[in-house]
Amino acid sequence: MALRAIRGAIQVPANTSDDIASGVQELIAAILKANELTPSDVISVFFTSTADLDAAFPAAACREMGFANVPLIGSVEVSVPGALDRTVRTMLHVETALTPEQITHIYLHGAASLRRDIAQ
């Protein structure tokens, strides 16, 4: 097993706690599924949100998915003029047998524009 980092992002429809929670859960579920992981394989999760998303903490939605014993933290993304709005980004540190080339990074909805080379 090796320590690997997996990146992902999702653009949510609106700054509501429901939209943020459902977006985070969709993103984390997609990352876990694509990389054949469970919450017990995850060492830590780091979230950033654009400044226009302040209705809920992304980590709170992740906790509801079985991440009770996983360290989670959130921060505000750097506010760059013209950057994609309503976006939650994440980086998971995981233990896996996958090689770096086998890792699947997940970019959903409008966030697909951030990494057109690997977006779903």
Image: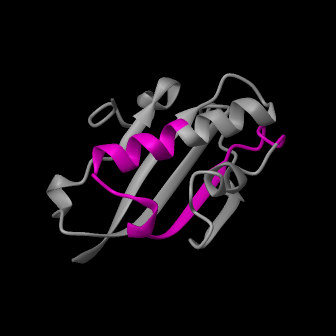
Residue placed most toward the observer, 49 or 62 = 62
From the viewer's perspective, is residue 44 above or below residue 55? below
Quarter of the image where the N terminus is located: bottom left
Front residue (pair 23, 110) = 23
Q: Say left or right for 97 vs 7.
A: left
Relative to 67, does residue 25 appear above or below in the rendering?
above
Q: Quadrant of residue 103?
A: bottom left
Q: Is residue 45 left or right of residue 68?
A: left
Is residue 102 placed above or below 93 in the rendered structure? above
Q: Is residue 63 magenta?
A: no
Q: Which residues are magenta?
A: 26-55
Residue at the spot 60% in from the left edge and 34% down from the top edge = 23
Q: Position of residue 113 (x, y in %)?
A: 43, 28
Q: Position of residue 108 (x, y in %)?
A: 45, 31
Count of numbered labels shown in the rendering: 0
Where residue 115 appears, as percent x and y from the top left, is 37, 37
Q: Is residue 114 left or right of residue 105?
A: right
Quadrant placement of the C terminus: top left
Residue 30, horizontal then vertical, whole percent: 40, 40
Q: Name the outermost residue toward the right.
A: 55
Residue 77 shows up from this direction: no
Instruction: Indicate yes or no whether the magenta region holds residue 39.
Output: yes
Q: Is residue 86 visible?
A: yes
